[in-house]
Image (cartoon, rainbow, N blue to C red):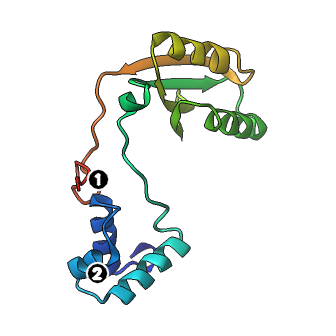
């Protein structure tokens, strides 16, 4: 098992992937262990870097950013300094939800959210088209975003 995960650890991770807000007592009951053992296991997985954090799933339209896009970026050169600088630069930009460093023709995929088309255009022009490391950027609008089934099949977030 990767990172010495046993069946109980995997059950904990599965339950948390469905509902990260699940109280420890309910989590412990679901996986069949004592609450103190459950808390210790969750803490251990956090310390080992298996459990990276707990995140809220937010309706971006409710935050005034209903327009989402994936932007494919190709760099002009591939020196480590340019790669590191570009990665650090884009991770700091408002509206960037995720940054994926890729193999192949596309060097990066950026998942971004914007208030409207003009804000998206300004983002591309101000931060990508003018960035010294960028050779090409191609924007694709996202019509709809839905979670996939994950590794345990929890396609929809839990509602409580």
Q: Which mark is residue 28?
A: 2
Are there few (<14), some (14-19), or many (20+) residues within 10 Å of tag 2? many
Residue visible at 30% across and 89% down in the picture: 34
The residue tagged 1 is 150
Residue visible at 28% across and 27% down in the picture: 144
Q: Position of residue 6 (x, y in %)?
A: 34, 81
Residue visible at 44% across and 84% down in the picture: 40
9 displayed left or right of 71: left
Q: Position of residue 151 (x, y in %)?
A: 29, 57
Residue visible at 69% across and 34% down in the picture: 89
Q: CA distance from mark 2 to mark 1?
A: 22 Å
143 displayed left or right of 39: left
Q: Secondary structure at mark 2?
A: helix
Q: Are marks 2 and 1 in contact (CB under 8 Å)?
A: no
- The quarter of the rendered structure image containing the N terminus is bottom left
127 displayed left or right of 153: right
Which label lies toward us, 2 or 1? 2
Q: Is residue 160 positioned above or below 137 on the image? A: below
């Amino acid at each position: 098992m990767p990172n010495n995960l046993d069946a109980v650890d995997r059950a904990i991770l599965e339950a948390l992937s469905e509902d990260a807000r699940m109280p420890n007592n309910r989590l412990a009951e679901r996986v069949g262990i004592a609450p103190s053992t459950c808390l210790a296991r969750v803490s251990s997985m956090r310390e080992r870097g298996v459990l990276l954090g707990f995140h809220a799933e937010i309706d971006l339209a409710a935050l005034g950013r209903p327009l989402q896009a994936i932007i494919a970026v190709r760099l002009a050169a591939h020196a480590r300094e340019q790669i590191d600088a570009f990665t650090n630069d884009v991770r700091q930009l408002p509206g960037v939800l995720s940054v994926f460093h890729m193999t192949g023709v596309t060097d990066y995929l950026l998942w971004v959210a914007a208030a409207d088309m003009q804000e998206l255009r300004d983002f591309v022009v101000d931060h990508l088209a003018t960035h010294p490391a960028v050779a090409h950027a191609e924007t694709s609008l996202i019509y709809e975003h839905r979670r996939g089934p994950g590794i345990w099949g929890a396609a929809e977030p839990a509602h409580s």
